[in-house]
Image (tube, grey):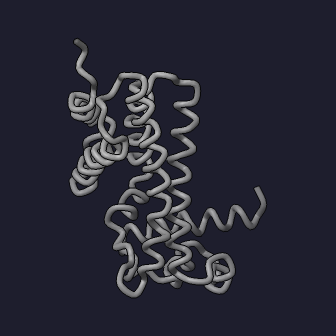
Amino acid sequence: MTEQSVRKKRIIGVARKVFAQKGYHLTTIDEVAKRTGIAKGTVYLYFPSKEKLFLEVLKDGMEGLREKIFQEIKGIDDPKEKIERLIYISLQFFEKHRSLFRTMLLGDIPRGEHKKTAKKAFKGYEEFMNWLSDIMREGIEKGVLRELKPQWLAIAFIGIMKDFLLHFIRKDGKTKLTEYYPVISQLFFKGALKEVK
C-alpha cells in the first residue's frame, strides 16, 4: 500500500468517527484534519469537499462489509445457510465498527440542498439490496423460501436487522450485538421459510 493510500485510509477512519459523533452538518474538514494530524490543504487534495469525504466514508464501509460477506459465503450453496452467515457476519462487523454504523444510520445524511449527495450515498445501499434480493430469489427457486417477491423478502430482512442495530446503538452497548443473532434468525425464517408438507 502506498503512502498516499495509507494517508487516505487514515483520513477516512478519522472522518468516520467525527461524522458519527457530530453528524454531517456539524462536522468540519478543519476538525478532521486536526484529529488526523494532517494539514487541511492536504485533506482537500484527497477530498475536495465535505460531501466527497462523507460519501467516501459510506462507500468504504459498505465495501468493507460486502467484501467480508463475500469471503465468508463463497462456496456455500444452501441459501438458508448463506442468509444465516450474512446475519452473523453483519452483526460482527457493526459490533467492531460501531462508529461506521452510527454514521450510516444516525449520521444526519444531507438532504434538501444536498439531494444529489444523498442519492449517491444510498447507491451502495441499493446495490447491496439488489445482491440480497438475488440470494432471496435463489432461496425461492430452490424451494427453501416462500414464493414472495425477492425484493420484499430483502426489505423484511433489512428491516429486522436495522431495528435491532438501532436498539443496540441507542443503548449503552454493553450487550454484544452478536447475541441478537438467534432471535433475528428466528424472526426472519419463521416468516420466510416454506412450510414442509
Q: Is residue 96 left or right of residue 9?
A: left
Instruction: From this view, report whether residue 191 is shown above or below residue 177.
Output: above
Q: Pinpoint residue 195: horizontal percent, then vertical percent.
A: 23, 20
Q: Is residue 97 left or right of residue 166?
A: right
Please tell me which residue is depicted at 45% across the width and 31% down the height of the picture: 138
Q: Quadrant of the C terminus?
A: top left
Instruction: From this view, report whether residue 141 is shown above or below residue 55.
Output: above
Instruction: From this view, report whether residue 160 is shown above or below residue 114.
Output: above
Residue extending furthest toward the right: 2
Q: Pinpoint residue 183: horizontal percent, then vertical percent.
A: 23, 32
Q: Quadrant of residue 70?
A: top right
Task: Tell which of 72 and 149 is nearer to you.
Answer: 149
Instruction: From this view, report whether residue 140 is shown above or below residue 121.
Output: above
Q: Quadrant of residue 82?
A: top left
Task: Tell which of 132 and 97 is nearer to you.
Answer: 132
Q: Pinpoint residue 80: horizontal percent, then vertical percent.
A: 39, 26
Q: Pinpoint residue 142: horizontal percent, then vertical percent.
A: 42, 23
Q: Please tell me how many numbered marks the rendered image carries.
A: 0
Please tell me which residue is depicted at 51% across the width and 39% down the height of the picture: 69
Q: Quadrant of the N terminus?
A: bottom right
Please tell me which residue is depicted at 53% across the width and 61% down the height of the picture: 59
Q: Is residue 173 visible?
A: no
Task: Tell which of 36 and 119 is nearer to you.
Answer: 119
Q: Is residue 88 visible?
A: yes
Q: Is residue 161 left or right of residue 92?
A: left
Please tell me which residue is depicted at 36% across the width and 46% down the height of the picture: 151
Q: Quadrant of residue 38?
A: bottom right
Residue extending furthest toward the top: 197
